Amino acid sequence: MYNRKPIAENIFHVGVNDRQKSLFENYLPLPKGVAYNSYLIVDEKIALVDTVDISFADVYLTKIEAILGERSIDYLIVNHMEPDHAGSIGLLRQKYPNITIVGNAKTFDMLNGYFHIHTQLHEVKEGDTLSLGKRTLTFYTAPMVHWPEVMVAYEDRDNILFSADAFGTFGTIDGDYSDACINTDCFWDEMRRYYACIVGKYGTPTQSALKKIASLPVKIICSTHGPVWQQEIVKVIDLYDKWSRYEAEEEGVVIAFGSMYGNTQQLTEAVAEGVVAGGIKNVVIHNVSKTDSSFILSDVFRYKGLIIGCPTYMGGVYPLVEKLLSAIECRGIKNRLYTCYGSFTWAGAAVKRLTAFSQTMNWELVGTPVENKQAVTKEKYQSGFELGQEMAKRLKLLHP
Ligand SMILES: Cc1cc2nc3c(=O)[nH]c(=O)nc-3n(C[C@H](O)[C@H](O)[C@H](O)COP(=O)(O)O)c2cc1C
Ligand SMILES: [Fe+2]
Ligand SMILES: [Fe+2]
């Protein structure tokens, strides 16, 4: 009926794929869908780790029943209260009235607020353990990765980390949940986009959480989204470490531009030609009107260089670029090499605002921003080209 292959002896993946939803949190595109993972540990005591979005409760409960039959569940471990994981808690309590819910004080505040559940609770604090028989879970709080109540649970026998959203990714699980059995190439960009959009603001709390788990001999990571990581553990932890320190993954430049009538786009071509002429091969150009800002944000996490261009619009910055600036500022992305350019017809304002953004972000401003009035002149095209070259030169200084 479905894949009942255990992750380890008597530990089962009972999560579901969401191939319907278009927008995660109602604003982030899901071209490859998303999975909500939940895990069932069958020991002397039976524990369920997190639940799934309520829309999938039917198939979810069926999966659990297929493993447990008439047996009940002793514990529901709630690592995270966001509704994509907490959604089915109320139903589970109805179906398994004797279930004890395991969480911390912050979990229970939310549990009461959302589900009016305040009985049969087992509160855990940092480092507390819960014996299930042969297996024992130890709990570590991971506040603000990416909600305040988030915690992770570590299983000591097979060294499994139930990590809540940490190490999660957009994208459904196609055919098998294990990273050892599938081609994982499709996940890396989506994992970065998930991190950038959802966790990206919380670099410091993520670093604290990584320090806590560094001492654990983790062999399997069971996140609430995406594959179960077994083969790629070193890679996923390394990526999380890089991203949460706001360190770029590789040499390259993101150029994000807005343009209504093509003038700023011409400057974009000039700047990109300059960057490549300067020896940088990784150049990604995003038109803010065509590419959702979540994909651009993901590339800002990926590359060290960022160049933004747009026209002046009603005395300010083109609206979709303003949206991107706000998304970047909210995440507090650090240490980027940055410059900008733009165009106007009667009174330029965009380049001034885009230039000031380097101060807002405390980023190094590379070269002199280029501002073009009306049709793009040869001279301005050349200035755009040189600006791109400046960026390449500055990047090359980092890795001579
Ligand atoms: C709705 C609208 C508002 C604009 N507001 C300003 C403005 O406040 N100041 C200005 O100098 N130009 C303004 N412009 C002119 C554009 O900035 C100018 O045409 C620019 O070259 C457009 O660049 P693009 O060809 O890349 O779209 C405005 C244009 C539009 C359509
Ligand atoms: Fe979440
Ligand atoms: Fe989630």
Image (cartoon, rainbow, N blue to C red):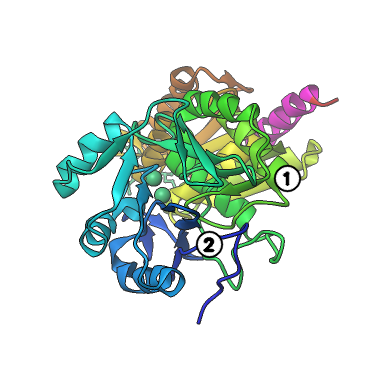
Density class for disc 1 (Cα within 10 Å; few <14, some 14-19, many ≥20) is some
* Amino acid type, mark 1: Asn
Q: Position of residue 16 (x, y in %)?
A: 44, 67
Instruction: Specify whether 152 is left or right of 190.
Output: left
Question: Is residue 397 highlighted in magenta?
Answer: yes
Q: Nearer the viewer, residue 230 or 217?
A: 217
Q: Nearer the viewer, residue 244 or 343?
A: 244
Q: Which residue is mark 1?
A: 282
Most common secondary structure along the magenta stretch: helix
Residue at left offset 74%, top offset 32%: 392
SS state under label 2: strand
Instruction: Specify whether 358 is left or right of 79.
Output: right
Q: Which residue is mark 2?
A: 12
Residue at left offset 51%, top offset 17%: 362
Vertical placement of residue 69 versus 126, above or below: below
Q: Position of residue 242 (x, y in %)?
A: 64, 32
Using the rendered image of the protein, determine whether residue 309 is visible from the camera's viewpoint: no
Density class for disc 2 (Cα within 10 Å; few <14, some 14-19, many ≥20) is many
Vertical placement of residue 221 versus 372, above or below: below
* Amino acid type, mark 2: Phe
The part of the image, by quadrant, that contains residue 328 is top left
Instruction: Specify whether 378 is left or right of 16.
Output: right
| Lower sequence index among marks 1 and 2 | 2
Q: Residue furthest right?
A: 400
Q: Which quarter shows the C terminus?
A: top right
Circles 1 and 2, Cβ within 8 Å, touching? The answer is no
Q: Which mark is residue 272?
A: none
| Magenta highlight range | 380-398
